[in-house]
Amino acid sequence: MIGEKWRLIVIVAALVSAATVAVAAAPISGSFTMEFVFQPACSDEIPGNDNVSPFPNCDKIDDLLVKVEADLLLTLAISGLDIASTTVFTFKGLESQTLLVGGTIGALIFRDTFIFAPSLVEVELVRSALSLSPRYCINMSTPGDLTPPFLDCPSPDATLYYLLENVGLIHPAVANLTLANIFDSADMLNAPLELAKKIVEININIAGLSVFFRGLFANFSTGQPASQTRSWQTGIVIGLEGQTVSGMVLRTETWFGARQGLECWGECKPLERNYGGKVVSTFSAQEEKIFIRNLNIAGIIHSFRIEFKFGQANPADNGLSFFEWNMRFRLTPFGAGLSMSNTLRIDGSLMPKFDIIAIDVNYGNTILNVIWYIYPDAMGDWQSQIAEIITTIDPPGATITSDLTFCTETLFVISCTAGVVQHDIIVSAAVNNLTVNLTLKMLGMLSGFAELWIDGTWQVGIVSFKASLAIAADYVEAIGFAMNVRF
C-alpha cells in the first residue's frame, strides 16, 4: 500500500513537470496543489467523561488520520477556444477527471463539461422551517448511501450545508477530512471512473436580452439498492435576462427535470461540485423562478426572488413556494457612510416567516454591522432581537474583527437562554509575502474557549505555501499543509 501511495506521488510530480515544460511550447496555464491534512484519532479513556460535541474526547491519541490530495488544473487557450482540465488525485489514485471546452462565437458563449468520477450525489436546496434559510438534503447518491449521516430529502440538513458552504462554522481543513471520511465509509470512492455527468451551457445575447440554456445529464442509479443500475437522466434550465435603461434587471428561469441545488462527485470537495442544479427522475416542469434586481424607487433599491414549484408529490407543495424581498439604501450623514438593508422571507402561503435588518456604519477605518432578527416565536408572537454585532477595525497592515452572536431564543440556538452565544475574534495581518489569519471562537463574551484557527500563507514567486491548524477545547481538530504552484 505504501508503495502505491509513493508511486502516485511520483506520477503526479511527473505530470506537473510535463505540464511545466509544455508551457514554453503552447499557451497553457494552470496550477498544481499538493495538500496534506492530519487529524488525531482520539479515544475516550476516562469513565464518565462524556463529550457533548460531535467529536470524541481526546483523552488518548491512538492513531493519526492522514489525507493526501493533489489537484492539477490546466487551461489551453487557442483562438478564443478554452480547453480546461481538472484532475484530482488521492491515496485512492485518480479520484475524478473533469474536462471543459468553452468559447465565444459572436454573441454566443458556450461551455461543454464532461465529468468522469466513481460517484455522483444529487444535493437539493431546501429551506429551513423556521427562518426559510437555505439548507441541503440528499436526494440521491450512487454507488453508496450517504443517509445516514446526512438527511434524506426533503428534510433540511444544516450539517451538510455547513460542510459544503464555507460559512465560518467549520474550518475548511476539518470539512475536507470529514467529507473524505464520510464518502470513503459509504463506499463512494472505490468504483471505477466512468462518465458520470455532462453539462452543456449556452448563452446568447440578442438586442440587449440574454438567453441562457443549461442542459444537465446525470448518470445515476435507479431501482432498489440490491439491483441498482446506472441510467441517464436529463434536466434543462432555460433563462431569459434583460436590463432596462434605469438599471433594473429582470431574469426568469424555467426548470424541466431539474431542481435547484448542486451535484457533486468524488469526495464532494469544491473542485468536485457543480452548482447549476440537480436532475430528477421525471422530465417535467419542476420550478419557475423570477428575479428582479436593482429596482430604484425613491432612492431605495428593491430586489425580489420569487420561486414556484411543480410536480411535487404533495399537491399542497405545488405553486408559490418562496418569496424574498430585499430593500437597501445608503446615507452619508456627518461624513460617516451608513447603509441599511431589510430582507423579508415569505413562505408559499404568503405568510411572513423571517425578517433580517442589517445596518452598516463606516467611519474612518472602522466598520460596524448590526443585525436584527424579527420572527414569530413558538406562541406565534413576533419578536425583535439583536442577533449579531460585527465590528471591524482596519489599521495599516492588519484587520481586526469582533463578531458577537446573541441568543435569539431556543427557536434558533437550543443551548442558550440569554446573552452572548458566541464571540469570534478574527485577526488578519500581512507582512511582506506572509499572510496570517487567526480566528478565536469563545462561547461567551470573553470566556468559554471553543476553537482556535490559525492559517498562514507564504508566497515565493509562483509558489505559495499554506499551513493550517484548528484546535478545539480539548483536542486538535486538524492540521493542514498545502503547496500551490501557478504557471
Image: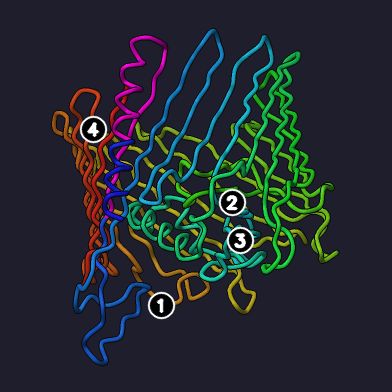
Check disc 3 and report the residue beneath it: 138
Occupied quadrant, residue 364:
top left
- Examine the structure image and report whether residue 25 is included in the region drawn in magenta: yes
Residue that label 4 marks: 464
**Mark 4 residue element:** strand
For marks 1 and 2, give the CA distance: 36 Å
Check residue 320 in the rendering and tell me which mark sits there, or answer none. none
Q: Which mark is residue 415?
A: 1
Counting from the top left corner in percent of width and height, residue 104 is at 62, 14
Residue 52 in the image, given as x and y percentages of width and height: 35, 80
- What residue sits 22% from the left and 85% below the top? 45
The residues bearing labels 3 and 2 have C-alpha atoms spaced at a distance of: 11 Å
Please tell me which residue is depicted at 21% across the width and 73% down the height of the picture.
62
Identified by mark 1, the residue type is Ser
Say which mark, if any, is on residue 120.
2
Q: Counting other residues with Cα less than 10 Å from the Cα at mark 4, is it few (<14), some (14-19), or many (20 or more)?
A: some
Q: Quadrant of the C terminus?
A: top left
